[in-house]
């Protein structure tokens, strides 16, 4: 069986390509952003539980592929998503038992949700995690816009609000984590929708937290409006909108940093793999030269120069390949003054590995309490990862160029030497 992490990386790339190339642009809610939210929520929920590694792997695969069916069909997309996930898993040699779990998880998200196993419950809760998040209002608008566009409808705000009320009242979370973290926020959204609905209708609505007072709704004599309360309400709505926009922006920034870090790590792994190939090939050639060819040179003196050229080429290529993978670690120590002046980047292990745990915890808390320091550290981390990558690929390019051109030169030298020896 292949390494789970490598298959997840390939799944990530495949799903991103599907959303970029095949999912229509007017799918404003069911886009890549929603899939990333579901993957993040599934990871968060599963982290609170003790899951077998295979179940966690199946869950993440299902989270990535659960909406890819929108590239083929809108209604009933779950079956299409399961088929796309199956083709991917077969191509990657995923075990049939794990594949069955992946498909079952995806199919369980179809409405009404019907999870049977624990990982199916986790994916269903992750798929509906936006109901219990600060972005619910914005996500709801995007879904309404999507439905109006796809089905050529014109659903009004009041009708959409009533639809959301009915959905939230009928929805339930399955996992303890979701009931603890998502459910209270979802209920707050429900209460807010009920209040708006009651105000627009001028009726009394019973809610889990009590009655919402009647708002007069007379066509001939509108009830007087308390201007001060109206202003406060408008300010509150504006504040909530600003807060939701800020939260969405922060999530976007966090997603950007995560994607950049993942890309840098992937490129670093690719560089290490290329360096390992170069080291392996050239060390094999050098070992053959030393063990076989050197003992024969006394009988074939014309091959001394070509052999020396080939040995020099291989040795030089190995040296630069090793330099590409050679680690460079700092002292691993920082001072309190470094934290106060925001000089040290605590996201890189080389800056703290020689520190005591309590000192590192203090430094991290100071950084987390200062958003500017935190973002600066993340930017520095990305920047220096890029510098390391540039160094790796610089040495790798030299190694491959030396090997390519040197090998051609060595073969020509052996050819000339053989021609001379035949005379």
Image (cartoon, rainbow, N blue to C red):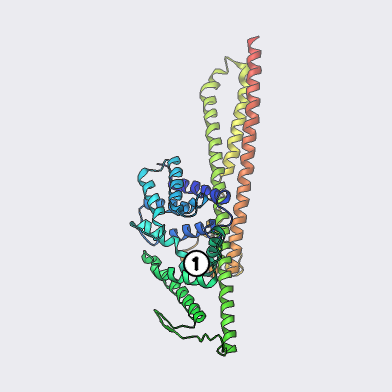
Residue under pointer 1: 359
User: In terms of depth relative to the viewer, which is nearer, 121 or 257?
Assistant: 121
Q: Where's the N terminus, which quadrant?
A: top left
Q: In the rendered image, which quarter is residue 393 located in?
A: top right
Residue 185: x and y, percent? 45, 72
Residue at point 64% right, 33% down?
A: 402
Residue 68: x and y, percent? 49, 51
Q: Is residue 62 above or below residue 373?
A: above
Residue at point 55% right, 71% down?
A: 244
Residue 86: x and y, percent? 43, 45
Decide if residue 254 is in sight here.
Answer: no
Q: Where's the C terminus, which quadrant?
A: top right
Q: Is residue 184 above or below residue 38?
A: below
User: In terms of depth relative to the viewer, which is nearer, 166 or 279?
Assistant: 166
Q: In this view, does 325 lie to the left or right of 85?
A: right
Crowd around label 1: few <14 · some 14–19 · many ≥20 (10 Å): few
Residue 354: x and y, percent? 50, 59
Residue at point 52% right, 30% down?
A: 284
């Amino acid at each position: 069986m292949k390494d789970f992490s490598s298959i997840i990386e390939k799944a990530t790339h495949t799903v991103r390509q599907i959303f970029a190339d095949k999912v229509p642009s007017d799918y404003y809610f069911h886009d890549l952003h929603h899939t990333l939210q579901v993957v993040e929520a599934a990871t968060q929920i599963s982290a609170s539980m003790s899951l077998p590694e295979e179940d966690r792997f199946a869950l993440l695969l299902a989270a990535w592929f659960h909406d890819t069916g929108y590239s083929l069909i809108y209604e009933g997309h779950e079956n299409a998503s399961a088929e796309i996930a199956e083709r991917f898993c077969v191509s990657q040699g995923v075990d049939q038992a794990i594949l069955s779990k992946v498909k079952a998880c995806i199919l369980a998200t179809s409405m009404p949700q019907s999870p049977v196993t624990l990982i199916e419950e986790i994916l269903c809760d992750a798929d509906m995690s936006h109901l219990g998040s600060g972005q619910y209002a914005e996500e709801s608008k995007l879904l309404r816009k999507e439905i109006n566009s796809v089905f050529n409808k014109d659903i009004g705000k009041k009708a959409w609000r009533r639809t959301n009320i009915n959905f939230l009242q009928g929805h339930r979370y399955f996992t303890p984590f979701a009931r603890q973290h998502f459910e209270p926020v979802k209920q707050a959204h429900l209460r807010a929708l009920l209040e708006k609905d009651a105000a627009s209708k001028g009726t009394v609505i019973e809610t889990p937290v009590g009655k919402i007072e009647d708002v007069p709704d007379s066509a001939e004599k509108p009830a007087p409006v308390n201007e001060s309360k109206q202003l406060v309400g408008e300010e509150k709505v504006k504040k909530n909108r600003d807060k939701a926009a800020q939260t969405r922006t922060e999530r976007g920034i966090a997603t950007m940093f995560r994607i950049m870090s993942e890309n840098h790590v992937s490129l670093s792994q690719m560089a290490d793999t290329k360096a390992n190939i170069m080291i392996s090939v050239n060390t094999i050639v050098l070992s053959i030269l030393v063990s076989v060819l050197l003992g024969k040179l006394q009988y074939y003196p014309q091959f001394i120069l070509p052999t020396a050229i080939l040995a020099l080429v291989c040795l030089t290529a190995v040296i630069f390949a090793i330099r590409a993978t050679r680690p460079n670690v700092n002292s691993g120590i920082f001072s309190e003054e470094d934290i106060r002046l925001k000089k040290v980047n605590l996201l890189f292990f080389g800056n703290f590995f020689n520190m005591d745990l309590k000192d590192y915890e203090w430094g991290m808390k100071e950084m987390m309490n200062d958003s500017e320091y935190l973002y600066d550290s993340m930017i520095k981390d990305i920047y220096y990862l890029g510098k390391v990558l540039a160094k790796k690929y610089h040495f790798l390019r030299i190694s491959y160029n030396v090997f390519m051109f040197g090998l051609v030169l060595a073969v020509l030298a052996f050819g000339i030497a053989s021609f001379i020896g035949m005379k």
